[in-house]
Image (spheres, grey):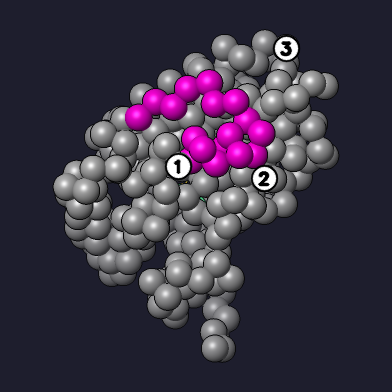
Amino acid sequence: MVIEQHNDPLTRFRAQDLDAAMADARRKQGVVTPMFDVIAPRYDAFTRLFSFGMDAVWKRDLIEAVVSRSVGAHRALDVACGTGDLGFSLAAQVPSLHVVGVDPSAGMLALAAARATREHTERVTFHLGEFAALPADPASIDVLTAGYGFRNVPDLDAAVRECARVIKPGGTLGSLDFFLPPNAIWRALFLWYLRASGNIVGWWWHRTPAIYGYIARSIASFVTADEFTALLQQHGFTVVSTRRMLFGGTALHLAVRQGTS
Ligand SMILES: C[S@@+](CC[C@H](N)C(=O)[O-])C[C@H]1O[C@@H](n2cnc3c(N)ncnc32)[C@H](O)[C@@H]1O
C-alpha cells in the first residue's frame, strides 16, 4: 500500500486508516508520531482537563517514588517525554542528575526545548528517538521514567527489553500509564467514556475525532497492569510496587533492574 507523504502532520494522520495502522506493528508509529505532532501545542492543557487534575497528582507520586531511590544518581532518561513534565521535575529534585528526554515527536520536543530555555534548565536535554533504540550504552542509566509512554510503542516486548538493556543493575524504572481494566463492565464503561469524550474534543479542536479517539483505541489493544508487571519481571526487573488507580485503568509501576554492577 502506498501512503502519500505530506509535511503537515494532520494531513499525514488523516491519510491513514487508524484502526488498520494500529493493528500492524510496522505501521503503528506512522500514525502515532503525526498524531502527537498535531496535539503537541494543546497537550498539557488537554491532559489536565481530561484527567480532572489527576494527571498532576499521579506524576507527582511517580516522581516521589523514583526520587526516593535516586540519591546520588547521575544519568536519567525520560522516555516518551512529550513536553518534558517528568524530566523537569526529576532534575529539579535530584541535583546530581542529568536527564535526557527522548521522544519521536518533533512537535513535542520543540515545546520541551522551549521550556528548558525559559526555565534555564541545563541539566535537561532532549533527543529525537524512540523506545526501540534508546540513546544510551548498556547498563549506563540510573533512572528511567516513562509517562504514558509504553502504550504507544509498536512492540511492547522490545521496548521493555531495550529499557532493561540501558538501565544499570540496581537502577530504577518508573512508569505511569493507562491500562486495560480487568473488570469487563468497568472496562467497557471506561473505554466508552474515553472514546466519546476523545472524539468530541478531536472534532472540536481538529475536526478529526480519531485524533483523541486514539487514547481509547490504544488502551483497548494494550495489556492490563498485572500483565505489564509480569512483562517487567520477564525482562529482569524486580517490581517494587504496582499501584492501580481508577480500578486498574491507570497504574504506576516502580521496578528495579536485577543484577550486580
Ligand atoms: C501521552 S504523551 C506523554 C508525554 C509525557 N511523558 C507526559 O507524561 O506528559 C506520549 C508520548 O509518547 C511519545 N511516543 C510515541 N511513540 C513513542 C515511541 N515509540 N517511543 C517513545 N516515545 C513515543 C509521543 O510522541 C508522546 O510525546
Q: Residues within 10 Å of mark 2 (few under 14, many from 20)?
A: some
Residue 172 in the image: state x and y as whole percent: 63, 25
Magenta span of residues: 228-244
Does residue 237 belong to the magenta stretch? yes
Q: Is residue 216 magenta?
A: no
Residue 252 position (above or below residue 231): above
- At 54% from the left and 55% from the top, the residue drawn is 153
- Mark 2 = which residue? 161
Residue contact at pointers 1 and 2, CB within 8 angstroms: no
Circle 3: residue type: Gly
Eyeballing the image, is 257 above or below 179? above
Residue 101 at least partly seen: no
Q: Residues within 10 Å of mark 1 (few under 14, many from 20)?
A: few
* Left or right of residue 162: residue 155: left
For image coordinates 34% across by 47% down, the residue present is 180
- Cα distance in 3D space between marks 1 and 2: 15 Å
Mark carried by residue 258 = none
* Dot 3 alpha-carbon crowd within 10 angstroms: few under 14, some 14 to 19, many 20 or more: few
| Location of mark 3 (residue) | 72
Badge 3 vs badge 1, beta-carbon distance below 8 Å: no
Q: Which residue is mark 1?
A: 227
Task: Point out the tag, 3 or 1, that comes first from the N-terminus.
Answer: 3
Q: CA distance from mark 3 to mark 2?
A: 25 Å
Q: Nearer the viewer, mark 3 or mark 2?
A: 2
Kindly state the secondary structure of the residue where label 1 is placed: helix
